[in-house]
């Protein structure tokens, strides 16, 4: 009937993330209130940029073509009203990014780079670029928080924890 009133029945569907997501957390582990950090130029390179998703497959993602182009994660974002990463505090990258889930092993690590400006009593005394080559497996629908601990000298601690709202994985420590 052309004059019939249309009915609206609810449509059920399931939404699931098909990509992986990551961001970075930086910890000031120096142990002295005299030292702080400013984190900038956070990049990841060597990620897969092309892939095919096959619905219903055991391993739905088939990835190819690794790029050396840098994916920006921005800069450090500090505690409210702070302009640097104080002793015992954390800062996060001001950008989180999604990308193709894939496995990065010994033969195809991805690269994380950032610059840390070291402050002593509020004055910049040093600028240090960091480059880390990381092996890790990213799964679809999972979000990862890469935790980077900054200490005195050249020592840093690197680990991974999962974020709420996505599937949870155990922390991953990278040496």
Image: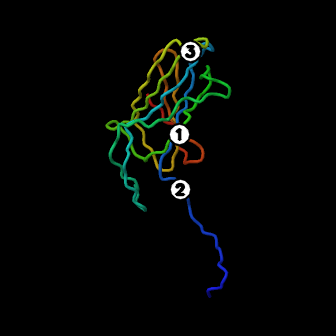
- Depth-wise, is mark 1 or mark 2 nearer the camera? 1
The kind of secondary structure element at disc 3 is: strand
- As drawn, 114 above or below 144: above
Q: Which mark is residue 48?
A: none
Between discs 3 and 2, the one toward the N terminus: 2
Label 1 – label 2 distance at C-alpha: 18 Å
The kind of secondary structure element at disc 1 is: loop
Q: Which mark is residue 119?
A: 3
Between discs 1 and 3, the one toward the N terminus: 1
Percent coordinates x, y for residue 69 in the rendering: 38, 37
- CA neighbours of label 1 inside 10 A, class few (<14), some (14 to 19), many (20+): some
Residue position marked by numbered label 1 in the rendering:
96
For the residue pair 128 and 162, the one nearer the viewer reads as 128
Count numbered badges in the picture.
3
Residue position marked by numbered label 2 in the rendering:
16
Seen at 51% across and 33% down, the residue is 74
């Amino acid at each position: 009937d052309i004059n019939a009133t249309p009915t609206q029945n609810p449509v059920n569907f399931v939404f699931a993330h098909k990509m992986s997501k990551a961001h970075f957390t930086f910890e000031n582990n120096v142990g002295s209130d005299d030292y702080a950090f400013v984190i900038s130029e956070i990049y990841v390179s060597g990620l897969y940029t092309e892939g095919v998703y096959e619905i219903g497959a055991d391993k739905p993602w088939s990835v190819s073509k690794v790029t050396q182009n840098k994916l920006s994660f921005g800069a450090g974002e500090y505690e409210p009203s702070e302009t640097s990463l104080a002793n015992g505090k954390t800062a996060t990258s001001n950008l989180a990014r999604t990308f193709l889930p894939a496995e990065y092993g010994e033969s195809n690590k991805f690269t994380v780079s950032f610059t840390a400006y070291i402050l002593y009593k509020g004055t910049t005394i040093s600028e240090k670029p960091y480059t880390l080559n990381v092996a890790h497996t990213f799964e679809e629908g999972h979000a990862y928080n890469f935790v980077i601990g900054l200490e005195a000298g050249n020592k840093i601690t690197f680990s991974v924890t999962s974020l709420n709202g996505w599937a949870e994985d155990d922390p991953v420590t990278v040496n």
